[in-house]
Image (cartoon, helix red, strand yellow):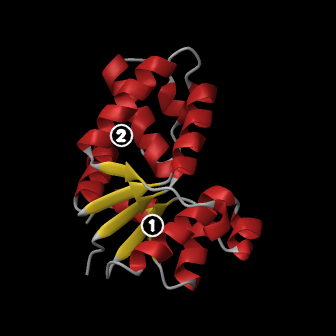
Amino acid sequence: MRAEELILDTGPLFDFLLLRFSEETGRVGLENDLNYLKTDLDAQRFRGFVTGHQIVLTTPGVVAEIQRHQRRHLPGDQGRFWRLARGQFHELRIDEEAVRLGEMEEGDLSNQGPVDASLLQLARRRLGQYRRVAVLTADRPLWERCRNQQILACWIHEILAGP
């Protein structure tokens, strides 16, 4: 059974945005900065997986991490990157939901840090409202923590491998 809701971690989402930026601007050399999505087929599989969910969420912490990556990989292209990112968020129906630091479990904070702790807490919060929630990540410790807490975790490499 597929999850109704999907929560996106930084790695797969930034790779998708960087790949789309490279395609739309024709900027060469960015393929060396991609960690997970490397081809148009990867982008299509990511898009298909994401749009197959009724609700798609991330946290403001993930967006802040994307900004850090953007500044490192695309200095001087901030305006163009964020225009594209806003458009992709709209097109893929990605919304942000904040998690307060005080809501995060101390163990998650000390082991995973605030961004991953916010993703875990968001998943727990949403599980209380909906039956099926999944976290899409490329981060092995986050994937394992989700599994240990009975939160459905999707590994980006499995999604990109296709059917």
Residue 130 in view here: yes
Side of 113 relative to 136 (left or right):
right
Mark 2, residues whose alpha carbon is within 10 Å: few (<14), some, or many (≥20)? Answer: some
Nearer the viewer's eye, disc 1 or disc 2?
1
Measuring from the top left, give residue 158's x and y in whole percent: 40, 65
Q: State the residue in front, 139 or 149.
A: 149
Residue 28 in view here: no
Residue at coordinates 33% horizontally, 42% vertically from top-left?
Answer: 89
Mark 1, residues whose alpha carbon is within 10 Å: few (<14), some, or many (≥20)? Answer: many
Please tell me whether mark 2 sits on a helix, a strand or a loop.
loop
Q: Report the amino acid beneath label 1.
A: Val
Measuring from the top left, give residue 61's x and y in whole percent: 57, 49
Q: In which quarter of the image is residue 154?
A: bottom left
| Residue, disc 2 | 39
Residue at coordinates 61% horizontally, 69% vertically from top-left?
Answer: 103
| Residue, disc 1 | 135
Side of 160 relative to 140 (left or right):
left
State which tag comes first along the sequence, 1 or 2.
2
Please tell me whether mark 1 sits on a helix, a strand or a loop.
strand
How many marks can you see? 2
Q: State the residue in front, 91 or 31.
A: 91
- For the residues labelled 1 and 2, the Cα–Cα distance comes to 22 Å
Measuring from the top left, give residue 24's x and y in whole percent: 32, 23
Residue at coordinates 51% horizontally, 56% vertically from top-left?
Answer: 98
Residue at coordinates 59% horizontally, 19% vertically from top-left?
Answer: 75
Side of 163 relative to 125 (left or right):
left
Q: Quadrant of residue 111?
A: bottom right
Asked if residue 96 is positioned above or below residue 151 in the image, the reply reads above
Q: Report the amino acid beneath label 2.
A: Thr
Q: Residue furthest right?
A: 110
